Amino acid sequence: MRKRDTTTKQTYRITHVDQLQEAARALLAKHSASRIFAFYGPMGVGKTTMIKAICLQLGVSDLVSSPSFPIVNHYVSDQGAPVYHFDFYRINKQEEVYDLGYEDYFYSGNYCFIEWPEKVESLLPPDVVVVDMQMHGVERVVTF
């Protein structure tokens, strides 16, 4: 079950990769005090690509890629702050997330971007920002 968000949602319709930067800027501006972001959407919708755009806005110069196998990638912003990128697609049991030490990440005060959050919903902090991504033809629709 997704976390309930009572704020007014913004929707971006993206037909070209260049439009991701505008959506990334808007997401960070709207949720400037937030640090935990959960990206929902089907395989191939562009969750990793959207997270790359957000990391670029944060000044991350590291290579941003899907952490499917390591489960979490660590990046560093231009301010020297850690940025964490999770991909829980391969998680079969929540015990795997406990072993990862998820609390150290989620409650660190640093940015955490989570792909496949539905696998760990009961562990997400109550203030998580839900980012919904869907495909409609050639258009990606991003709502937050």
Image (spheres, helix red, strand yellow):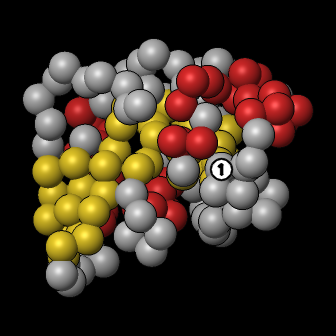
Q: Is residue 73 left or right of residue 45?
A: right
Please tell me whether mark 1 sits on a helix, a strand or a loop: loop
Residue 105, percent from left and from top? 70, 29
Q: Disc 1 residue type?
A: Phe
Q: Residue at x 41, y 31 (%)?
A: 1
Res 41 seen here = yes
Residue 116, compared with residue 56, is above or below; it is: above
> How many tags in the picture?
1
Instruction: Give the residue at the far right of this rendering.
Output: 99
Q: Is residue 134 left or right of residue 67?
A: left
The quadrant in which residue 111 appears is top right
**Mark 1, other Cα within 10 Å: few <14 / some 14–19 / many ≥20:** many
Nearer to us in this view, 130 or 112: 130
Q: Residue at x 54, y 51 (%)?
A: 115
Q: Is residue 44 left or right of residue 99?
A: left
Q: Is residue 39 left or right of residue 122?
A: left
Q: Residue at x 64, y 18 (%)?
A: 107
Nearer to us in this view, 103 or 54: 103
Q: Residue at x 11, y 29 (%)?
A: 8
Residue 91, percent from left and from top? 73, 49
Residue 66, percent from left and from top? 63, 65
Residue 97, compared with residue 76, is above or below; it is: above
Q: Residue at label 1? A: 88
Residue 79, compared with residue 124, is above or below; it is: below
The quadrant in which residue 131 appears is top left
